[in-house]
Image (cartoon, coloured by chain):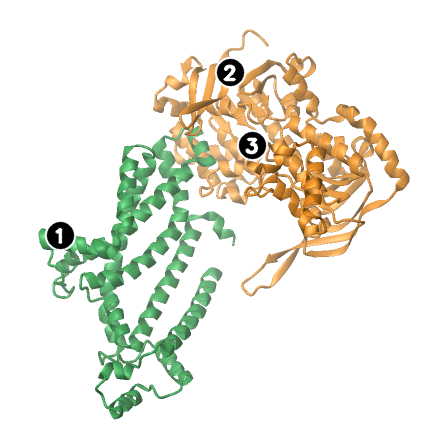
Amino acid sequence: MQEAEKTLLKVEHLQIGFRERKKMNVVVKDVSFSVKEGEILGIVGESGSGKSMTALSILGLLSKEAKLVNGNIIFEDKELYHCTKKEFCKIRGNDISMIFQEPMTSLNPVMKIGSQIEEMLLLHSSINETERKQKVLDILEEAGLQNSELLIGKYPHQLSGGMRQRVMIAMAMVMKPKLLIADEPTTALDVTVQEQILKLIQRFNKEYKTAVIFISHDLGIIKNLCHRAIVMCNGFIEEEGSIQKIFENPESEYTKKLLSAVPGRDRINQFEQQEDEIQAASITEQKQALEVKQLNGFYLEQKNLFGQNAKKKILDNISFSVAQGEIVGIVGESGCGKSTLAKAVLGLLEQTEGTIHTFGERPAMVFQDPFSSLNPTKKIKWLMEEPLKLKGGFSKQQRQQKIMEMLKEVGLEEEHMNRYVSELSGGQRQRVSIACALITNSRLVVLDEPVSALDVTIQAQILKLLLKLRKTFDLSYVFISHDLNVVYQMCDRICVMYQGKMIEIAERQELFENPKEEYTRKLLSAIPWI
Amino acid sequence: MKFAFQKAGTLMITLFIISIVTFFAFQVIPGDSATANLGIDASPEQVEALREQYGLNKSLLERYGEWAVNALRGDFGTSFSYRVPVRTLIGERLPVTLMLGMTAILIILAASAPLGILAARWDGRLPEKLITIANQIGMAIPSFFLGMIISLVFGVILKWFIPGQYVGFSENPGGFFRYLIFPAAAIAIPKTAMLVKFLHNSIVRQLGMEYVRTARSKGNSEHQILYRHAFQNALLPVITFLAIIIMEVLANSIIIEQVFSVPGMGRLLVAAISNRDFPVVQAIVLYIAIVVILLNGLVDLLYHYIDPRVKTL
């Protein structure tokens, strides 16, 4: 860092809390940092680390319940929290602007795209209508959106997720602010779209010297995008420094733990050995666990008043098989049909053609979101007992016995039996989901994005658990994920899906080193590796 | 356009079903209109003659067919008790009820929009708390009781109007409205309280949304956030609620017309039911059904207009 670079924003001893009844629950405890002109500063941390609260507090966007307890935020020698409301409104959008995680809900659903961007110009400039319109068109083009003339008349729901985020960025950049705060702007997007959005932010940073505070849970993005980074944990700054220092020479124990939890190519080694054993075993047996042949899957679309239905093809001629003890990964971007395929394998898709053969027990399923896929009004014991009751043939004592065994297998305690889902953490909930799936002795488990909703350290624990369980029970997994890093770490073979078709099936190493399809190559190159 | 056709189609089918239900329901209800009209002292010959005159001796299907064909032409037959065409009866009273209902709705709209916005802007503070207390009271008092209180306070004590002394529009338009405002207020106040509460909650919910956070990050003032962003979104659920309220206004006007002696549809309906005056009852039920269906259609249309997401149907 050169000395000549001026400090743009200074955050000093920030402390933010939530009012809970009469007590103050402090979430951000003591955070100080500064941003220099034109730099990209990354703030990385797991959920609950206080990174988003820190970002929101800069523009005074904290929700009603949250309160800035202590600290100064100084932007260009101006103490933001001592400004009048009017002064603060002049800074927002004009000098500092912000983009958010969910572009769908962050844009006003009943306002046209053009008007939403134009509003910035109305608030912060005095140019006339024709000039405003030209500026809106220009910034949309700059944000990589074609047909901007057509676009300004559209509403947010008419655009794709990537386009919406581009609109958000265009809106944030139209006043050429000195600082852009980006709060997880690519978390809701597919990996190839994410790559484009990151490039766009990088370009605006270079062209307009706009400094960026980039908040993310994804260490790969931080490494590839930022100049400097801050690692946050439990409301404190754990470590601060250049990207090189943090990724190559981390000092804090927490940073080291975080880095080692990230799935990546060089991290495979820690699992490699035990996997080799299993693979060897499974190959000698060569028993099939699942065979899908020429599967077509459809959704019915209500077409008109008279109830004539149109079939929409979601799965197009899919064939693949899973051997006993094998983990087959299915990757693809949103809308490619991977979750529909999971439904089909479980027999939950009504409109299918072709054959699905599962050998042995009914396959079990683990869903992405352990928060909404477990009934919140039931105790864990009830949730785990239900599949056994449905299957039948167990006495009450046998069921009790099985529940206790299974809890131990997934790393939970007996006392968890009498808890409600809301009393468990995300990781514990996913352990319960896994226990529910395995309790009826299913040997084939379909995992639909099982770790996508979890923090990276918890994710690593769940992935380890899945590998351990595979060994214990000789399980086969169909592992669906959008995260190629996770798939790389977990799977023996990988299927790539694109627009309902299975375009490539290969051994893991083969796929990552020698992809045959153009789309696979694009997908692979878009991942921000560590 | 396709939407309008679909709506018209549903309207026709619904009306057809309702016409059948109302027609046959009154055939099953015990009590004979001929005896009800002539009194219990009438001789069997008199009763028989009247039944013949009204066509009550024909088969059910025949009578429904005749009734439906005539109804389509706007002819609902002759009232048993008033001995005049139903059309004339309704023609006299419908404008009165419509005026009463519309005045009530205007009061509801004019009062609840500013109060709801005020409560949302001062959420958790004194103005909102006062409005909420007033709402609780307003919602707890039934319309007819409120009508009695209004009659007592404004009529008997303050003498702003003479209770029961209805002024017709043709005699004295000014007096007509001066009289109507009191029953309308009795209908409107409880509904206003409900709508204020609903609008308040809806705006507060919208103010917690992420797009409002975006609007704030752009440099909008709280005033601009409320009027330019939150209000339109907050209106969407309110529209459905408003349609329900308008229907309740209709139902309440039946009671309030009794309390204030307003010669509208409500009083006609009550009298017609106790007299077994079926042609009148059937016509009024059909009229209420048409109003309800039209209102629902209007709500759907409004949604299309305000919420761009609905257009992708």
* Cα distance between the residues tagged 3 and 2: 33 Å
Q: Does residue B82 appear in the picture of this structure?
A: yes
Helix, strand, or loop for circle 3?
A: loop
- The image shows residue B181, relative to residue B24, as above or below, that is above
Q: Are marks 1 and 3 in one subunit?
A: no
Where does the image place residue A330, in percent across and percent down from the top left? 73, 40
Q: Which mark is residue B154?
A: 1
Please name whichever residue, A496 or B136, is drawn nearer the observer in this view of the structure: B136
Pointer 3 with pointer 2, Cβ within 8 A = no
Front of the two marks 3 and 2: 2
Looking at the image, tell me whether mark 3 or mark 2 is earlier in sequence order.
2
**What residue would you read off at disc 3?**
A143
In the figure, the green chain has which letter? B
Within-10-Å neighbours for mark 1: few <14, some 14–19, many 20+: some
Q: Is residue A176 visible?
A: no
Q: Residue at x 20, y 67 (%)?
A: B263
Q: Check the residue under mark 1 and report the chain it is in.
A: B
Residue A378 in the image: above or below residue B267? above
Chain the render paints orange: A
Instruction: Report the mark closest to the observer, 1 or 2.
Output: 1
Q: Amino acid at mark 1?
A: Phe
Q: Say few, some or many: other residues with alpha carbon within 10 Å of mark 3 (under 14 / 14 to 19 / 20 or more).
A: many
> Around disc 2, counting alpha carbons within 10 Å, would you say few (fewer than 14), some (14 to 19), or many (20 or more)?
many
Question: In the picture, residue B129 is in which quadrant?
Answer: top left
Disc 2: which residue: A31
